[in-house]
Amino acid sequence: MLSVLPLHHTFEFSTGLLVPLARGARITYLQDLTGDAISNVLKAGKITAIVGVPAVWETLRRRVLQKFSDRSATLESLVNALTRPTLNCVRAPGSTSACSSSSPCTRASAAGCAT
């Protein structure tokens, strides 16, 4: 498991430390939270899970999109078009629904939204 949040963060302490320890998992910590550091540890380690907050996922998304952008503008446009509905699939403030009513989520992509 890759742990990227500080241990004083309540979410990290419970889901990134206590739960993995209780399950006998190996925890890997990063010195720096950068796209390169995450990429390197994913390549080198046996990471099967990552616990994170939206900022972590945004860092990973930017890194992946940059890789596509480096290859070709057409490929970047295609990946952006394919991921746009998923990125818009977020909980609206004060809503009990995972996707806001203005979100372009379809039934298929809404199934991937957390409630």
Image (spheres, grey):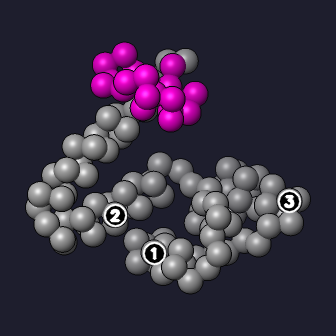
Judge by depth and name the residue closer to the eye, 88 or 107: 107
User: What type of secondary structure mainly makes up the magenta span?
Assistant: loop
Callout count: 3
Quarter-of-image position of residue 46: bottom right
Q: Residue at x 50, y 35 (%)?
A: 112
Estimate the x, y position of residue 36 in percent, counting from the top left: 41, 78
**Residue type, numbered disc 3:** Arg
Mark 3 lies on residue: 23
Estimate the x, y position of residue 31 in percent, counting from the top left: 56, 80
In the displayed structure, would residue 58 be above or below residue 102?
below
In the displayed structure, would residue 112 be above or below residue 72?
above
Q: Residue at x 32, y 35 (%)?
A: 85
In the displayed structure, would residue 102 be above or below residue 9?
above
Estimate the x, y position of residue 90 in percent, counting from the top left: 43, 32
Mark 2 lies on residue: 64
Quarter-of-image position of residue 99: top left
Q: Secondary structure at mark 3?
A: helix
The disc placed on residue 39 is: 1
Tell me if 59 is positioned left or right of 113 in this view: left
The disc placed on residue 73 is: none
Tell me if 63 is positioned left or right of 73 in this view: right
Residue contact at pointers 2 and 1, CB within 8 angstroms: no
Which is nearer the N-term, disc 3 or disc 2? 3
Instruction: Look at the image and give the residue range highlighted in magenta.
Output: 97-115
**Residue type, numbered disc 2:** Val
Tell me if 90 is positioned left or right of 23 in this view: left
Which is nearer the N-term, disc 1 or disc 3? 3
Which is nearer the N-term, disc 2 or disc 1? 1
